């Protein structure tokens, strides 16, 4: 491949992050056919790869598809070209966040923010804190109200978080890997 | 000795990296070199004429050509030398391309190396001996291995030209996979109708010796002179006496113990059987593994009913030796099986399609048997599971092909065409049936092929969906097929009654073993290697062995037939003369020095070393020494390298020549 | 036999009974756990979804702890934790640049390979016959649908222990308890995973399909080996009742609870009473007899 006059594109970013080239995908659609959340996505998974292949980066980064991806790896395990599509989706998400693209799946983003805050603060997922923070961010105050009292009574949800001793080491990890 | 040096630019191939004029100029000064010139294309007519002119004008004794690999043009330059009057073995090639310009970037260093290479060749050629070609007689008989359409065609072509053919087939009947097909594309001819006349022609041909239920066990010799050992497996039926009446088959009580492989395991067959009614020869075989006589000594019904006393329970395998001059490989293919493979296999099988557990998820050959009028359902479309007529069939292409993860990277070439054919055959018989084809691409490049596929879509209403299928599951007797149409971007789920998988065409499971027996190379998939993919697709790299049909790579019937005729033609080229010229680059033992350790005999890959006795005048044996059979020796040099006492030398590459070449560096 | 133990965040919260039953069963079968000291989140779910480096570092922090603790192998009972740990370990070992980055973030050097096992591998290591030998109750009346979920068996080149399309390892364990297993279609279909909170509708849809399929193939109980799956399949049945009027409750057990029952423990000590959908083996047997 000629290296002069080469502009570093998002496809190259994806290659750096996933160690695989998007040109592997020959658009057979087997991934989309087996994806359990396919029906909820605005763009089929194989189509997202196609958009990246052809350089339609904005359309790909703005789609809800990577955020709805459940990470079940059905696609990756069945792909005849052994293209790890789940890993590709990971990379697309990361790049969407890095580039500050407007993401439509707002609730999902808020869930992830809440979850990560908990880990950063306590070292482990503190479920009550997670749900509380999520509810505040999304104002879905009545969600899970049906199951929560039961969970409390069974001792499954702890009121106070458990902090790991070496909280600092986890905080350090977050700091060192923060997205630019 | 007067030597001529000729440096070829090979266009840009050498000229771009090696400064050929400088090389030519430098070589002028080498001791013994009378003339040193360079030219753009030495192998061309003007180039060759240049060489001839210089040889004659300057009265040269030997020449060195700095050019591409000897594989390419050594013959050309040797012929030119002969035309000008010098022995062809006083020609040395210095490989300035594969050994120099193609593997280096730096022009200065590459040119220096080129000069070194030419100088080495000059020193060698000074010591070269003028050798004469060896002549061996040719056995004008051909062995054809495999009795499918390719083998049949090759055998008929050679036999019709007047030469004897030995046709060996491992199944009890010839016909191969073509005899299992219902109809062939693109004409929808009945397969057996067009095949069986040829099968009969083979059987009746006076020049064809047909050996069915036989396998090649050993091959010795070389081009023009092969000695082949063939194992005729015991049929337990006397072929001379049997009339093919079939009574033994009808009366055999063991009817449901063995699957009929001709029917692709969709039906049973008795212990004594012919694979199909039109089998050639129409002589049954007794399957020892299920026959009750072999299990517990009982039964023997066949003996009682046979009016000709043809049953021979204690018949043994027989080894037959045949002398042939050419071998044609026509062993064909097998279909990839989606069953689960063992852990250490590089192929995985298809778990998402059930690993073969669903009875109505079948492959192409099974579909052919169902569609075939002589098949287990007599041509009616019936599901293997419950015998009901399927109203919705899904065809899936590229199962195992174009699939690095679970199968093979290559395209199997025929599936697009036969899937269209299958869908059409189904629609022709079940008018209210629905047929769906999941495809990735449509590969229909032959004559009238694309029109054939369009006919399936436009006239017969077959629905083509572009995308692969992710999973097949069974629910309430129906098969839920989950796929995707990438053209519309819509997920497609179909509840099918039957699913037909177009599985990959793969090499026979014993292909690599057979290739090793014959002594020919094969690729990582087990397909036999052709000598050159573009210009020599019929010959294997081993002289005298030719390839025909799907054993070389996936292909359809017209291509197999064409290739078979081509292989026959190649064999007949060999038979064009009575004597075959062989290169005199063979090993020779110095009888005085040989100590008789026979290490050479152990390492010779061609079994060319024999034991010779050295006797006194009175006939007393003094010692045994090694002797190289010039007819078998291929000049590989293994013995020369092995001999501890340096008693063997390779003509054209003897020690003096090689050492001079090295010393010149 | 001593084995490292990485509980994962759910074991102390919503999957408390999984932790309880696992510890009790393992002890009965003669193995003890050496819990990783001060373990932290494995990096699955949100870290993995938003920041790959963060997720690798979080995962490898625990591998580092295991190595420092002198462990050769450890078990992660949550399938998501197991998958994240194994995949991070694999990527770190395969790509030197990734390893360098992780080592610099964690300020450590990895010197040996700690084997991370999932629940099924743990029982295979303990020895399936031990379950049968110590069995006190033969769970004859149970027809079990073994649910593997996504992450136990995929990707098969890295997890390397069972087939990713038609796995059989859980069935082998279940059969040791005397229960029968059914062949069904959704063994490895996704339950909706981490969408449980932000996109509950997806989880209800996917998990309902899985429960229905198990029922259709004749199962009367489902067995899982992942707390996320259990939450989606068990706890969310409350919501399924609202969304789908035809929904019928279907009990979902952890594999360890099933084994515990076979070893003679009761529902209360195993924590089965903490499930949303009630299950009691003796009652089930009585119901069947009454019919």
Image (cartoon, helix red, strand yellow):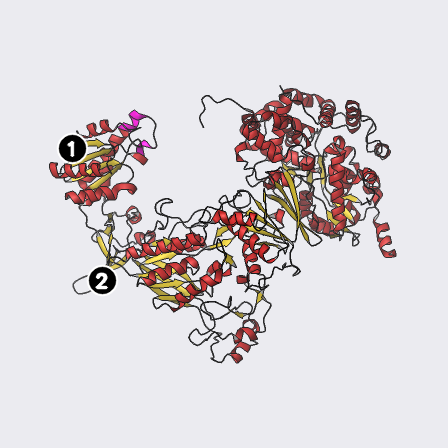
Residue at numbered disc 1: B35
User: From the viewer's perspective, is residue B78 above or below residue B36?
Assistant: below
Query: Does B212 appear in magenta?
Result: no
Nearer the observer, C233 or A10: A10
**Residue at the extreme right:** C290
Closer to the observer: label 1 or label 2? Answer: 1
Q: Is residue B511 left or right of residue B225?
A: right
Whether residue C134 is visible: no
Q: Is residue C40 left or right of residue B119?
A: right
Question: Residue visible at 80% across and 45% down?
Answer: C251
Q: Secondary structure at mark 1?
A: strand
Residue B621's mark? 2
Query: Does B100 appear in magenta?
Result: yes
Tell me the subunit letter for badge 2: B
Nearer the observer, B276 or B25: B276
Q: Which residues are magenta?
A: B99-111
Nearer the observer, B273 or C226: B273
């Amino acid at each position: 491949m000629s290296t002069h006059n080469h502009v570093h594109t998002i496809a190259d970013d994806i290659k750096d992050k996933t160690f695989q080239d998007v040109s592997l995908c020959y658009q057979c659609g087997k991934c989309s056919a087996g994806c359990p959340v396919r029906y909820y996505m605005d763009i089929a998974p194989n189509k997202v790869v196609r958009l990246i292949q052809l350089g339609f980066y904005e359309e790909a980064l703005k789609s809800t598809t990577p955020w709805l991806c459940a990470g079940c790896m059905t696609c990756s395990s069945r792909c005849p070209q052994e293209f790890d599509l789940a890993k590709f989706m990971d990379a697309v998400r990361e790049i969407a966040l890095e580039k500050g693209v407007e993401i439509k799946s707002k609730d999902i983003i808020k869930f992830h923010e809440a979850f990560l805050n908990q880990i950063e603060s306590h070292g482990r997922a503190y479920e009550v804190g997670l749900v509380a923070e999520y509810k505040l961010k999304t104002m879905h105050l009545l969600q899970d109200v049906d199951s929560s009292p039961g969970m409390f009574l069974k001792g499954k949800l702890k009121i106070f978080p458990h902090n790991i001793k070496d909280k600092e080491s986890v905080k350090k990890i977050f700091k060192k890997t923060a997205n630019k | 000795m007067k030597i001529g040096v000729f440096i070829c630019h090979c266009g840009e191939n050498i000229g771009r990296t090696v400064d050929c004029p400088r090389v030519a100029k430098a070589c002028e000064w080498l001791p013994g070199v009378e003339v040193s010139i360079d030219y753009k294309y030495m192998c061309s007519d003007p180039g060759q004429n240049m060489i001839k002119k210089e040889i004659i004008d300057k009265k040269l004794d030997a020449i060195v050509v700095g050019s591409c690999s000897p594989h390419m043009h050594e013959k050309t330059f040797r012929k030119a030398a002969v035309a000008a009057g010098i022995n062809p073995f006083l020609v040395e090639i210095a490989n300035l391309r594969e050994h120099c310009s193609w593997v280096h970037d730096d022009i200065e260093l590459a040119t220096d190396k080129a000069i070194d290479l030419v100088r080495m060749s000059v020193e060698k050629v000074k010591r070269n001996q003028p050798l004469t070609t060896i002549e061996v007689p040719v056995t004008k008989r051909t062995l054809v291995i495999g009795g499918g359409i390719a083998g049949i065609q090759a055998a008929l072509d050679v036999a019709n030209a007047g030469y004897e053919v030995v046709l060996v087939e491992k199944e009890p009947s010839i016909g191969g996979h073509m005899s299992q097909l219902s109809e062939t594309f693109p004409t929808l001819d009945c397969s057996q109708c067009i095949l069986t006349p040829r099968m009969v022609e083979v059987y009746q041909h006076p020049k064809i010796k047909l050996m069915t239920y036989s396998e090649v066990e050993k091959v010795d010799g070389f081009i023009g002179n092969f000695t082949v050992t063939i194992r005729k497996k015991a049929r337990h039926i006397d072929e001379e006496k049997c009339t093919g009446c079939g009574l033994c088959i009808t009366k055999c009580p063991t009817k449901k113990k063995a699957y009929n492989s001709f029917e692709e395991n969709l039906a049973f067959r008795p212990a004594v059987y012919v694979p199909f009614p039109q089998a050639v020869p129409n002589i049954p075989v007794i399957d020892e593994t299920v026959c009750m006589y072999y299990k517990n000594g009982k039964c023997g019904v066949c003996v009682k009913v046979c009016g000709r006393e043809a049953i021979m329970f204690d018949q043994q395998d027989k080894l037959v030796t045949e002398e042939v001059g050419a071998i044609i490989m026509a062993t064909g293919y097998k279909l990839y099986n989606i069953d689960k493979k063992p852990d250490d296999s590089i192929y995985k099988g298809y778990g998402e399609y059930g690993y073969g557990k669903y009875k109505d998820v079948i492959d192409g050959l099974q579909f052919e048997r169902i569609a075939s009028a002589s098949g287990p359902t007599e041509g009616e479309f019936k599901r293997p599971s419950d015998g009901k007529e399927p109203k919705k069939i899904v065809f899936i292409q590229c199962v195992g092909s174009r699939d690095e993860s679970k199968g093979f990277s290559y395209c199997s070439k025929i599936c697009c065409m036969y899937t269209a054919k299958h869908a059409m055959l189904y629609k022709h018989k079940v008018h209210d049936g629905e047929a769906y084809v999941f495809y990735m691409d449509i590969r229909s490049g032959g004559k009238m092929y694309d029109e054939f596929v369009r006919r399936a879509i436009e006239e017969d209403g077959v629905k083509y969906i572009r995308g692969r299928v992710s999973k097949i599951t069974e629910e309430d007797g129906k098969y839920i097929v989950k796929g995707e149409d990438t053209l519309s971007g819509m997920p497609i789920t179909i509840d099918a009654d039957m699913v037909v998988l177009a599985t990959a065409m793969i090499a026979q499971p014993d292909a690599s073993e057979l290739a090793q027996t014959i002594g020919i190379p094969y690729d990582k998939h087990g397909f036999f290697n052709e000598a050159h993919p573009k210009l020599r697709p019929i010959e294997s790299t081993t002289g005298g062995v030719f390839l025909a049909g799907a054993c070389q790579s996936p292909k359809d019937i017209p291509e197999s037939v064409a290739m078979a005729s081509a292989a026959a033609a190649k064999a007949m080229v060999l038979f064009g003369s009575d004597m075959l010229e062989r290169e005199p680059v063979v090993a020779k033992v110095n009888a005085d020095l040989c100590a008789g350790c026979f290490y050479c005999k152990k390492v010779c890959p061609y079994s060319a070393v024999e034991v010779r006795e050295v006797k006194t005048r009175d006939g007393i044996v003094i010692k045994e020494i090694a002797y190289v059979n010039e007819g078998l020796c291929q000049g590989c040099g293994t013995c020369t390298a092995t001999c501890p006492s340096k008693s063997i030398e390779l003509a054209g590459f003897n020690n003096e020549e090689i050492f001079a070449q090295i010393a010149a560096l | 036999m001593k084995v490292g133990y990485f509980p994962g965040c759910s074991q102390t919260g919503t999957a408390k009974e999984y932790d309880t039953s696992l510890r009790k069963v393992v002890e009965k079968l003669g193995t003890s756990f050496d819990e990783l000291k001060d373990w932290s989140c494995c990096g699955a779910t949100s870290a993995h979804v938003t920041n790959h480096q963060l997720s690798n570092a979080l995962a490898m922090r625990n591998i580092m702890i295991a190595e420092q603790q002198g462990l050769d192998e450890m078990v992660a009972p949550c399938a998501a934790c197991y998958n994240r740990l194994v995949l991070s370990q694999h990527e770190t070992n395969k790509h030197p640049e990734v390893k360098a980055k992780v080592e610099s973030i964690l300020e450590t050097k990895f010197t040996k390979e700690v084997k991370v096992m999932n629940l099924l591998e743990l029982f295979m290591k303990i020895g399936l016959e031990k379950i049968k030998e110590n069995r006190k109750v033969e769970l004859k009346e149970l027809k079990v649908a073994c649910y593997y979920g996504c992450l136990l068996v995929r990707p098969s080149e890295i997890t390397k222990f069972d087939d990713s399309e038609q796995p059989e390892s859980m069935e082998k364990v279940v059969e040791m308890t005397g229960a029968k297993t059914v062949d069904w279609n959704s063994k490895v279909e996704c339950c909706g995973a981490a969408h449980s909170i932000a996109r509950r509708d997806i989880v209800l849809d996917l998990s309902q399909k899985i429960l229905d399929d198990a029922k259709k193939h004749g199962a009367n109980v489902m067995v899982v080996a992942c707390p996320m799956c259990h939450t989606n399949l068990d706890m969310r049945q409350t919501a399924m009742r609202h969304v789908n009027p035809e929904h019928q409750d279907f009990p979902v057990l952890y594999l360890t609870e099933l084994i515990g029952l076979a070893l003679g423990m009761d529902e209360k000590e195993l924590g089965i009473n903490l499930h949303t959908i009630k299950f009691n083996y003796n009652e089930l047997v009585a119901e069947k007899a009454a019919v």
